[in-house]
Image (cartoon, helix red, strand yellow):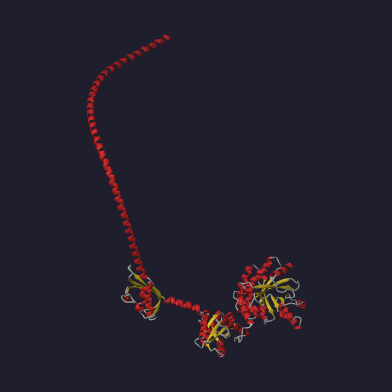
Amino acid sequence: MPRYRLTTELKKLASKLEEFEQERLDLEAVLLTTTEHGDLIETALFNELRQFRLRLEQLEQEHKGLEREKTDLEIALETVTETTDLFQKDLLKTRHILEQEVNKRTEELALQNQRLQAEIQERKRIEADLQLAASVFRTSREGIVIMDAERRVISVNPAFTDLTGYVEAEMLGTDLSRLQSGQHSQTFFHNLWEAVHFVGYWSGEVWHRRKTEEAFPTWFSLTVIHDDQGNIVNYIGILTDNTYQKRSEERAYYFAHYDALTNLPNRNLFQDRLEQAIKRAIRENHHLSLLVIDLDSFKDINEVFGHQVGDQLLKEIGQRLVKCLQEKDELIARLGSDEFVIVFDELPADERLVQITLDKADNVLMAIQRPLQLLDQELSVSACGGLAFYPRDGQNLVELLRRANANLYEAKRQGYNNYHYFAGPMNAQTKKRLTLQHHLRYALEREELFLLYQPQVDIHSRKIAGVEALLRWQHPEFGLISPSEFIPIVEDIGLIVPVGEWVLSSATRQAQRWLAQGLSPVRMAVNLSMRQFNDPLLLQRVHRALLEAQLAPHYLELEITESLAMQDAEKTVTTLRQLKQLGVFLALDDFGTGYSSLSYLSQFPLDVLKIDAAFIGKIQTPNGANLVSAITTLARSLRMDVIAEGVETKAQLNCLQRYACDYVQGFYFYKPMPAHELTVLLQQQC
């Protein structure tokens, strides 16, 4: 087997050798063909090489020519470069010169442009000013007239025509003399023009005349216009209609010097006229007298019939007083409210002075007293008067008015419908009253008024159950003033309502302070005057006092007198019921001194009846005891508590206990005391 395989392999090898031989023969044939082609190629390449050499030689010749041209060009370029450098230097120099010229010219043009713009702006401004001036001239509400150097009119505006009635065509070429009203002299106008030439302008009030011949007041301004050389070129006049302002001034003067209701002179004008009258009396050596008048019960008329009737009454009285004036030099004025004053001037400086004045005063009071019809109401009023004589009673306005007012108060003290004058010096009592009257106006703000509190004691337990607030005045000069002395003055000068409101506010605050300190609750009693009770704002004042003090209403007791309650019983019932709705307690003070109607008394929603001290003083007499017993029985039947005032003795207290009185108030237990002393007592009974 191996030999067979070797033979096979040798055969395969021989076959492959034959294939290799054939491939060699094929290659030799190809090589022969390639050699033939190579010869042809070589010949072609040789020919091309020869042509290339020829071309190369040609290019070398061209190159040499180009080199020569290059050299020539370089030489030429160097020449051109040198020339260019010189030209560039010249060009830069020329450019620099040109730039300087351009900059210079630009600056000049800019400056010219600025000047031109400024001139344009100035012309625009002038044009705007001219337009504005023309507009102002045309639309101004003041009349404007323009004149030339010869004072001839060359232009007027529409307002001038509206004011004067003259159109421009009527005024051109004329002067302003046609506007003269005749109320000023030629000297006035001469001085006017002199002032214009000397100062440059003039202004003031001038009465001009319209085309209709009507004179009217103007505020006239005149100005002169000069040119650059100082020559007069124009005058400009401005007229402002002063009619409305004059009327306003007259109206303001009227209201400042006259009473708007009666059209009589007021206090300001009266004082001025009186001072003039005194100077005239000194100069002409004559006397004068003063009558100050105050209507009786005028406040009551206002309250009962209303302010409309009151105003009509004052107007009618003023007219009557004017008719009483017999001489042109007599003066009447309204000083305020229902107070008037008359000055009788140019009276003889002898014993007839007083009698003439008294006769005139009688006529005045009689004129006032005549019945008059006002708004379907027929009324009769009277007045009191106070007289003063110059120079006997005073050398000046203040002294005369002081003496006249003092006499007026004395006349009112004596009764209605009379006058009074002092035959001698003012007495000390009158001086004191006037002083108190003056000081009372400032007593509140100076804190001279204060409250004392008098305890009201439970008759059974002997404990303090309530207090009454009592007003006192510590005067810096006269010391402690009695309430009976200063309270009537408070009422006369119209301060009782504000003073009463202060008392109410102070008392309620004190009551709340005691409650806040944890002391035994006590009811605070406050008296109401007639004017307080009739005050339309009473309910609001009481409500406000309670709110501000934060005091419960049942701790406040309001007291009114029996006489006050019965003045207008029906109104009293209404007012008391309104107060009762607030929750306060109500007491009738001084019971037994008036004339109460039992029917009305039963309608009054009262909580407390206070027996007047005058009855307590007589309680140990049979009649007094019976009267007190009857009062307590009446109070019981009306379900009212009873407080006895003015209890000063043990015997009085024992009687009151027998008659079932509830509370007592008086010196037997306590006098009126300051709040801090009462605080100690309340602390002790806790």
Residue 435 visible in this rendered orientation of the protein = yes
User: Is residue 117 shown above or below 244?
Assistant: above
Say left or right for 86 vs 348: left
Say left or right for 365 vs 454: left
User: Is residue 279 shown above or below 554?
Assistant: below
Residue 599: quadrant of the picture: bottom right
Q: Position of residue 95 (x, y in %)?
A: 29, 47
User: Is residue 232 shown above or below 618?
Assistant: above
User: Is residue 405 shown above or below 89?
Assistant: below
Residue 378 visible in this rendered orientation of the protein = no
Q: Position of residue 65 (x, y in %)?
A: 22, 31
Residue 637: quadrant of the picture: bottom right
Q: How many labels, in total?
A: 0
Residue 69: quadrant of the picture: top left
Say left or right for 322 vs 51: right
Q: Position of residue 459 (x, y in %)?
A: 75, 74
Q: Closest to the observer: 18 or 516?
A: 516
Say left or right for 130 vs 465: left
Q: Position of residue 25 (x, y in %)?
A: 30, 15
Residue at 74% x, 71% y is 463
Q: Closest to the observer: 491 or 217?
A: 217
Q: Residue furthest top?
A: 3
Where is the N terminus found, in terms of image quarters?
top left
